[in-house]
Amino acid sequence: MSKIVVVTGAAGFIGRWVVRELLERGYTVRGLDDLSNSSHRNIAEFEDSERFDLVEGDVCNPKTVTSRFDDDVDACIHLAAEIDVQESLEDPQSHFESNVVGTQNILEACRQAEARLGLVGTCMVYDMVDSDAGIDEEHPVKPASPYAGSKLAAEDLAEGYYHGYDLPVTILRPFNTYGPYQKTSMAGGVVSIFTNRDLQGKPLKIFGDGTQTRDLLYATDCARFIVDGTFSDDAIGEVLNAGTGTDISINELAEVIATEDTEITHVEHHHPQSEVQKLLCDPSKAEEMLGWEPQVSLEEGIDQLRDWLREQNES
Ligand SMILES: NC(=O)c1ccc[n+]([C@@H]2O[C@H](COP(=O)([O-])OP(=O)(O)OC[C@H]3O[C@@H](n4cnc5c(N)ncnc54)[C@H](O)[C@@H]3O)[C@@H](O)[C@H]2O)c1
């Protein structure tokens, strides 16, 4: 019988790639998503599959969460979260509910069902790095926004269940991820926003001076990391980073994406206090423990994203 995995945030950007990866590997997927930042369009590709279904519901509701779990569930991959740094500064309570209370409900459901958990954290919990050595899992944390704080609190809760109940938990911290299906509005990511604006002939607006850097991970590489990390026995109780090991400044990224006539401008940063100036991943622990490594270069990834966005804009 096919193994069963509950995926929260299954209709979201990374969630839909994780669902795709799981279905390709033969798993059965029970999705849960309240569609607050996504839509059925993201998962239309899987909706005919007998091994996939989605319940529309909130992870803050314990009954909704437990309705997805029973003794047949082998694992849960928890991605559901509110992810917008600016919104978290404006409405921290909502981020707390979804990201902290929601995670508590997932932990309890995993404990009852004896299911292992891949908890998807984020690189945004780290303090900036000031050298080219890269951020490893021992690097100091410094949550600089309610979003980052709520994600770190969720990790702490999970660690409590790992030590307190022996719940098999792996904490997975991908660096900034981009690719098809990511939103091109402010709730999306910089690569998707810039690529879409370039296609539409609009100026690329850089927040602040553009010297801040990101280590950009392509969606399929991120999804492989999350699935590999969730099912690795060696990784239980561990924190794992995933990134490419190379960072790029937002100024350089704009140059890579902008085609001939596209203007690049600088605008005032909405939340400079919550910006992480340099985010460069040291992915060696995941490489050694999981045998995982990124396969898609930034240039290939941007090409694939551009093709996909072009199709979306035409349809
Ligand atoms: N995008 C990135 O660069 C990145 C990097 C590192 C980690 N992450 C983490 O990966 C996860 C997915 O992020 P994403 O970029 O795909 O964002 P996303 O917004 O596309 O996905 C999150 C999904 O969760 C759903 N959701 C939100 N609150 C919910 C709730 N209370 N109940 C049920 N569903 C809810 C949303 O509708 C959405 O479909 C998040 O946990 C995020 O912190 C993202």
Image (cartoon, grey):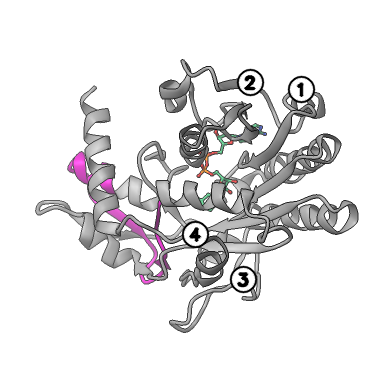
Q: CA distance from mark 4 to mark 2?
A: 28 Å
Magenta region:
195-218
Tell me if residue 246 can be seen: yes
Instruction: Provide residue 62's location: percent of width, then percent of height.
Output: 81, 29
| Quarter of the figure with residue 260 | bottom left
Mark earlier in primary sequence (1, 4): 1
The label nearer to you, 3 versus 4, is 3
Viewed as shown, does residue 131 lie left or right of 63?
left
Q: Amino acid at mark 1?
A: Ser
Residue under the image location 80 percent in, 53 percent down: 157
Q: Crowding near pointer 4: few (<14 within 10 Å), some, many (20+)?
A: many
Mark earlier in primary sequence (3, 2): 2
Mark earlier in primary sequence (3, 4): 3
Q: Residue furthest front?
A: 1
Residue occupied by mark 2 = 55
Q: CA distance from mark 1 to mark 2?
A: 9 Å
> Quadrant of the image for the C terminus?
top left
Q: Amino acid at mark 3?
A: Glu
Q: Amino acid at mark 4?
A: Phe
Residue occupied by mark 4 = 175
Residue 202 falls within the magenta-colored stretch: yes
Q: Amino acid at mark 2?
A: Val
Q: Crowding near pointer 2: few (<14 within 10 Å), some, many (20+)?
A: some
Does dot 2 land on a helix, a strand or a loop?
Answer: strand
Residue occupied by mark 1 = 67
Mark earlier in primary sequence (1, 2): 2
In depth, the one of 58 and 225 nearer the eye is 225
Q: Crowding near pointer 3: few (<14 within 10 Å), some, many (20+)?
A: some
Q: Which mark is residue 137?
A: 3
